[in-house]
Amino acid sequence: MKQEKICLVTGASGGIGRAISRELASAGYTVILQGRDLDKLTDIRKELRYNSHIVCGDLTDENARNRILNEAFDYGDIELLVNNAGISSFSDFQDLAKRELVNLMDINLLSPMLFTHEFLKRLSPSKSTNTNKVKATIVNVGSAFGSIGYPGFSAYCASKFGLYGFTESLSRELADSNIRVAYFAPRATHTNINSDIVDEMNRSLGNASDSPEFVAKEFMTLIRSNKARKFVGWPEKFFARFNGVFPEIVDRAISTKLNKIKRFFNKSRTSESVSEISLVEEK
Ligand SMILES: NC(=O)c1ccc[n+]([C@@H]2O[C@H](COP(=O)([O-])OP(=O)(O)OC[C@H]3O[C@@H](n4cnc5c(N)ncnc54)[C@H](OP(=O)(O)O)[C@@H]3O)[C@@H](O)[C@H]2O)c1
């Protein structure tokens, strides 16, 4: 009898998570959908024709993380974990509230590390150099900004550089085991993570932006390969590597755009104060 393939996708209620869940369901996986919003997840479950389950909760909460994993493993052995949940922030670093900074590092870096830690305990990796014997794959969703520091995204870049470092280390550490660890780095993608101002800035700078459906197809090529990393989109995939070798050249390229980028910080600041005013008015 053919065994059921089960995967767990965090942030499945978001743009990229939903598109990835769709692709995985089409590839025959039973998808365990994780997010915080039950209504959104129920909607996706309907779309996947119930070939899925829901585990709801906040990944920054230790009890929720343990419960999510217990509930997920009750459905059977998980073959694929996609650590995709994340948030972003765009502003002048000094305008970033301390609370926002801590929250961002927690959701984007600490939580996926702690979640993976707990996940591995439930799998007990064993030695195997035979790549056909992979028992489970963990994919961490990073970003092009996990390899290129960009003005206005200091905290986000720090979290994704950290996630990349974590993924690479763990992947190398487990290279002689039956667990595969890989890193997937989209570039700008049309989802709610980007504010209107970030979308406008990308258009104005001529930065390409992908659809979540395209990104999910790229994700599937990583899953079907035995590669340890995949960067999406040209020229970002080149710059991600180039920045590691000749960062001074990338410094100069970005500095020619700095004035323009900073104009969007100011716009962002103004729009935030407008929404704060409207919140006060609503009260
Ligand atoms: N879009 C881009 O331009 C882009 C580019 C490169 C990389 N990425 C990465 O791709 C991943 C997915 O982003 P997206 O673009 O699809 O963003 P999105 O549409 O905003 O979705 C984010 C997802 O993360 C979940 N999430 C956020 N905080 C959470 C928490 N504390 N606990 C549990 N779930 C939480 C959200 O759940 P709720 O529905 O409960 O809020 C949502 O499902 C992120 O890691 C992001 O950094 C995105």
Image (spheres, rainbow, N blue to C red):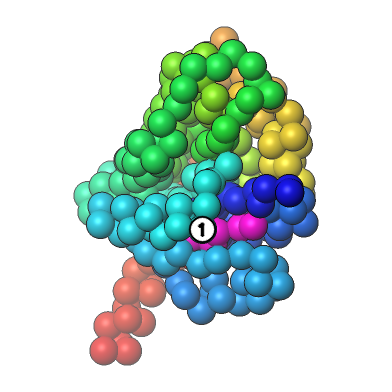
- Residue 179: x and y in percent read 53, 28
Badge 1 amino acid: Tyr
Horizontal relation, residue 283 to residue 104: left or right? left
Q: For the point 54% across and 71% down, which residue is it?
A: 41
* Residue 104, x across and y down, in percent: 35, 48
Residue 282 visible in the shown view:
yes
Q: Is residue 136 left or right of residue 122?
A: right
Mark 1 CB near ligand 1 (8 Å cut): no
Answer whether residue 269 is visible to the viewer in this image: no
Quarter holding residue 23: bottom right
Q: Quadrant of the C terminus?
A: bottom left
Question: From the viewer's perspective, is residue 22 above or below residue 43?
Answer: above
- Above or below — where is 110 with respect to 171? below
Residue at the bottom extreme of this rendering: 282
Q: Position of residue 118 (x, y in %)?
A: 34, 41
Q: In the image as oriented, which residue stretches furthest toward the top?
A: 245
How far across and how far down the image is residue 224, in percent? Answer: 74, 34
Circle 1 packing at 10 Å, graded few (<14), some (14-19), many (20+), is: few
Residue 40 in which image quadrant: bottom right
Up-down relation of residue 41 to residue 107 (above or below)? below
Indicate yes or no whether the magenta region holds residue 149.
Answer: no
Check disc 1 and report its element: helix, strand or loop: loop
Q: Which residue is mark 1?
A: 75
Please give left or right for residue 174 compared with residue 93 in the image: right
Stretch in magenta: 30-34
Residue 165 in which image quadrant:
top left
**Most foreground residue, 215 or 70:** 70
Residue in the picture at 52% in, 14% down: 176
